[in-house]
Amino acid sequence: MRLLPYFKVTMISFFLIIASSCKEEKSTKTEDKVIVSFKKEGLLSLKKANSDSIIKTIDIEIADTDYETQTGLMYRTKLDTNQGMLFIFPNVQMRSFYMKNTKIPLDIIYIDEDLSIVSFQKNAKPFDETSLPSEAPAKYVLEINGGLSDEWQLSVGDKISFTQTTND
């Protein structure tokens, strides 16, 4: 009969552990419900500097407001190979990005006012808050999936051109 109180305490503890773990699981599922989808707002072509031949043309989402440039590709779970985000800034200056709340590895391409690539930050690690600066002043920044700038053999001096889609 002395084992009965220990058995009751053990069973109560067991049920409390199960109940608390269920609560934790529910909160995790809520976080993952935030889905941010790609919104095509233009087309961007990457061109070789020496020949002007087109390397690749991709769909772009444009970040040109304070909120959009601060948020960028945060919270995204995927970005297709033919997609990227183009940041358009009002001025030319040294730029620095980081990967806070960014779930996918990215190549960050810094571009000057003449639409020439001035530097890269390749394979930026998800969630890393380390500063990833440009090596020269930039007016534009293009983010694409990590590894694509090497796959497409992009180099400093290569150019971009882009058009924005109008939503009239």
Image (cartoon, rainbow, N blue to C red):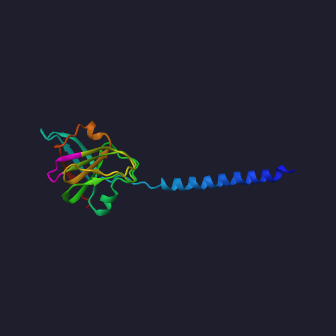
Q: Give the range drawn in magenta.
A: 112-119
Estimate the x, y position of residue 76 in percent, counting from the top left: 39, 51
Q: In which quarter of the image is residue 96?
A: bottom left
Estimate the x, y position of residue 51 in percent, counting from the top left: 12, 38
Q: Does the magenta stretch mainly form a helix, a strand or a loop? A: loop
Q: Which of 60 and 27 is in front in this view?
A: 27
> Which residue occupies the extreme bottom position in the image?
66
Image quadrant where one finds the C terminus: bottom left
At x 26%, y 41%, the residue is: 149
At x 25%, y 38%, the residue is: 152
Estimate the x, y position of residue 8 in percent, counting from the top left: 78, 53
Magenta-span inclusion, residue 148: no
> Which residue occupies the extreme right position in the image?
1
Q: How many labels does the image show?
A: 0
**In the image, is 29 to the left or to the right of 95?**
right
Estimate the x, y position of residue 133 in percent, counting from the top left: 26, 51
**In the image, is 13 to the left or to the right of 21?**
right
**In the image, is 10 to the left or to the right of 51?**
right
Q: Which of 15 and 29 is in front in this view?
A: 15
Q: Quadrant of residue 45?
A: top left
> Which residue occupies the extreme left position in the image?
50
When the figure is inspected, residue 78 is found, relative to residue 31, above or below; the finding is: above
**In the image, is 23 to the left or to the right of 149?**
right
